[in-house]
Image (cartoon, rainbow, N blue to C red):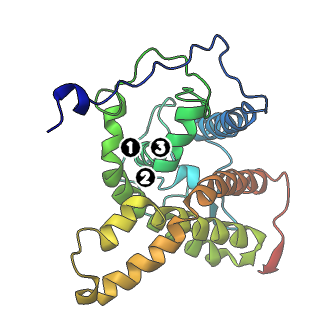
Amino acid sequence: MASPAQTQVPTTPARARIGARTLRTDRWWLSPLLTSVGLGVFVVYATVRSFMRSGYWAAEEHYLTPFYSPCLSTSCVPGSSHFGTPLGELPGFIPLAFLSLPFLLGFRLTCYYYRKAYYRSVWMSPPACAVAEPHGKYTGETRLPLIVQNAHRYFFYAALIITIVNTYDAIVAFQGGFGLGNVILLVNVVLLWCYTVSCHSCRHVTGGRLKHFSKNPVRYRIWTQVSKLNTRHMQFAWITLASLMLTDLYVWLVSTGTIADLRFVN
């Protein structure tokens, strides 16, 4: 029988003491930099446009930008309120789409991909493999504010409703005929659906907690398709940021008369 000394697990050697922050010689900082710039551009653009209160509704073409949908206040310009105006006048410091924007922001902020993106780029936790992070400790998503990340599944349900609203807006736009703006709105909605349903929470809703896929063939089929989209969730996350800005910019330019909408059918 082996003695206690013989069975004792040997201690692990201490980590090497490296004075440099990293020994990497490649441009490891490029990816977090580009991510920070990309996210920053969208945040600045979306924030400015959400508070402008102009250029969000092209009356003749029936184009409504997603940044102002749904517009439920009497502060909204005539025609832009597809669901009526149950709310009164809103002060200028409140966005006209204040009922949807917080949930969309919460959905994006708590998204599993976006967490990785801004954890590494903005918070530098960690900025890259084999690169020391500047933080002295890490408590995980167990305390405020990061504990809110656990509410992602609930933000998903809200985002699903808002995507339906955006789809309705794109359909209503065809009342003004058929132009390039309709194509842009429709493509944006399709991409938003791809991003929303490729979410990890949607994958869990469709196939989570099933013990036997064979007994739930419909849910298994849906789960399979969602899983395929889930592999492209990162791409959809970035593409939809670009499509949202492009859609809003186009509606802005058309509604202000800066450019004329290319019409196919009047």
Q: Which quarter of the rendered picture does the C terminus lie within?
A: bottom right
Q: Give the labeled residue for mark 1.
A: 88
Type of amino acid under label 3: Leu
Q: Residue at x 46, y 48 (%)?
A: 111
Q: Give the labeled residue for mark 3.
A: 105
Mark 1 element type: loop
Q: CA distance from mark 3 to mark 2?
A: 19 Å
Observer-nearest of 71 and 37: 37
- Mark 3: give few (<14), some (14-19) or many (20+) Cα within 10 Å: some
Type of amino acid under label 2: Leu
Type of amino acid under label 1: Gly
Q: Residue at x 39, y 76 (%)?
A: 223
Q: Position of residue 45 (x, y in %)?
A: 67, 38
Q: Give the labeled residue for mark 2.
A: 72
Q: Position of residue 106 (x, y in %)?
A: 42, 43
Residue at the farthest front position: 1
Observer-nearest of 247 and 17: 17
Mark 3 element type: helix
Residue mark closest to the camera, 3 vs 1: 3
Q: Position of residue 176 (x, y in %)?
A: 67, 74
Q: Is residue 181 above or below residue 21?
A: below
Observer-nearest of 169 and 240: 240
Q: CA distance from mark 1 to mark 2?
A: 8 Å
Earlier sequence position, callout 1 versus callout 2? 2
- Mark 2: give few (<14), some (14-19) or many (20+) Cα within 10 Å: many
Q: Is residue 138 left or right of residue 258?
A: left
Q: Position of residue 222 (x, y in %)?
A: 40, 80
Q: CA distance from mark 3 to mark 1?
A: 24 Å
Residue mark closest to the camera, 1 vs 2: 2
- Mark 1: give few (<14), some (14-19) or many (20+) Cα within 10 Å: few
